[in-house]
Image (cartoon, rainbow, N blue to C red):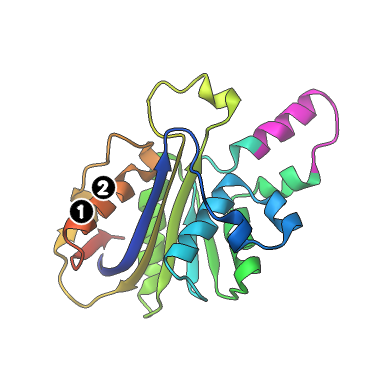
């Protein structure tokens, strides 16, 4: 089944090292909450701000999850000390979307997706299925692996941080392009590369209807 999507708006973030000026102080006034935020949570909150997300349903994806927090937990286990409760809480995949929902008062459905290199594709597919009932869906994928333990192993040259946010609705029009026909951008990690290509296409063709096979 091919679902036709109208991309109402979209935004991308990426940096070779670390994305700066995510407006944490402006967007998260509570200092304690702000200090608990992971890098992916900060990116997701910023994307939601830029895209003016209110109470939309959320489909959030990440292949790598919260690497810094996961590494901290593993270090604690290795040293036979107690892991930080905050690290443990932040290590779950839906933590960024949960933080955003708490901060914004969003009471709509949240779904998290993680499927390795196919994470971006399956996040969009999940959002497309959710959009069939007529709802507007906030779909986002965030990846951050700019930590010292990973930095030394990076040989692909991809940005250490990257994120994509889209507001989508279903459409009854025939697709102008099939998502599966897009080639993943070689600049980014596979889990987000094809979504980045989709955004590049939409910059040139902002009214295009996108078909995705589900």
| Mark 2, other Cα within 10 Å: few <14 / some 14–19 / many ≥20 | some
Magenta stretch: give its range: 69-84
Q: What element carries label 2?
A: helix
Query: How many marks on residues?
Result: 2
Residue 121 on image: x %, y % = 35, 51
Q: Is mark 1 on a helix, strand or loop?
A: helix
Residue 142 on image: x %, y % = 47, 48
Residue 26 on image: x %, y % = 59, 61
Residue 63 visible: no
Tell me which residue sits at (24%, 51%) in the image: 200
- Residue pointed to by mark 2: 197
Q: Is the magenta stretch mostly helix, strand or loop?
A: helix
In the picture provided, is 204 more to the left or to the right than 20?
A: left
In the picture provided, is 47 more to the left or to the right than 208?
A: right
Image quarter (top left, top right, bottom left or bottom right) of the C terminus: bottom left
Above-or-below relation of 71 to 1: above
In the picture provided, is 20 more to the left or to the right than 122?
A: right
| Mark 1, other Cα within 10 Å: few <14 / some 14–19 / many ≥20 | some
Q: Is residue 196 magenta?
A: no
The residues bearing labels 2 and 1 have C-alpha atoms spaced at a distance of 6 Å
* Label of residue 201 in the image: 1
Image quarter (top left, top right, bottom left or bottom right) of the N terminus: bottom left
| Closer-to-camera residue (182/102) | 102
Q: Is disc 2 in contact with disc 1, using a CB cutoff of under 8 Å?
A: yes
Above-or-below relation of 172 to 35: below
């Amino acid at each position: 089944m091919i679902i036709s999507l109208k991309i109402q708006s979209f935004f991308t973030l990426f940096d070779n090292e670390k994305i700066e000026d995510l407006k944490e102080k402006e967007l998260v006034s509570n200092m304690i909450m702000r200090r608990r935020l992971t890098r992916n949570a900060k990116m997701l909150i910023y994307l939601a701000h830029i895209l003016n997300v209110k109470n939309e349903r959320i489909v959030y994806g990440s292949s790598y999850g919260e690497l810094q927090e996961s590494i901290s937990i593993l270090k604690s286990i290795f040293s036979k000390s107690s892991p930080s409760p905050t690290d443990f809480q932040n290590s779950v995949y839906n933590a960024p979307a949960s933080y955003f929902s708490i901060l914004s008062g969003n009471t709509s459905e949240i779904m998290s997706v993680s499927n390795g290199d196919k994470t971006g594709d399956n996040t969009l597919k999940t959002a497309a299925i959710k959009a069939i009932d007529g709802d507007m869906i906030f779909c986002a994928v965030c990846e951050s692996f700019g930590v010292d333990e990973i930095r030394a192993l990076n040989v692909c040259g991809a940005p250490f941080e990257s994120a994509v946010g889209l507001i989508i609705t279903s459409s009854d029009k025939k697709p102008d392009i099939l998502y599966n026909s897009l080639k993943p951008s070689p600049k980014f990690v596979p889990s987000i590369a094809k979504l980045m290509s989709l955004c590049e296409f939409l910059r040139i063709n902002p009214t295009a209807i996108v078909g995705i096979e589900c």
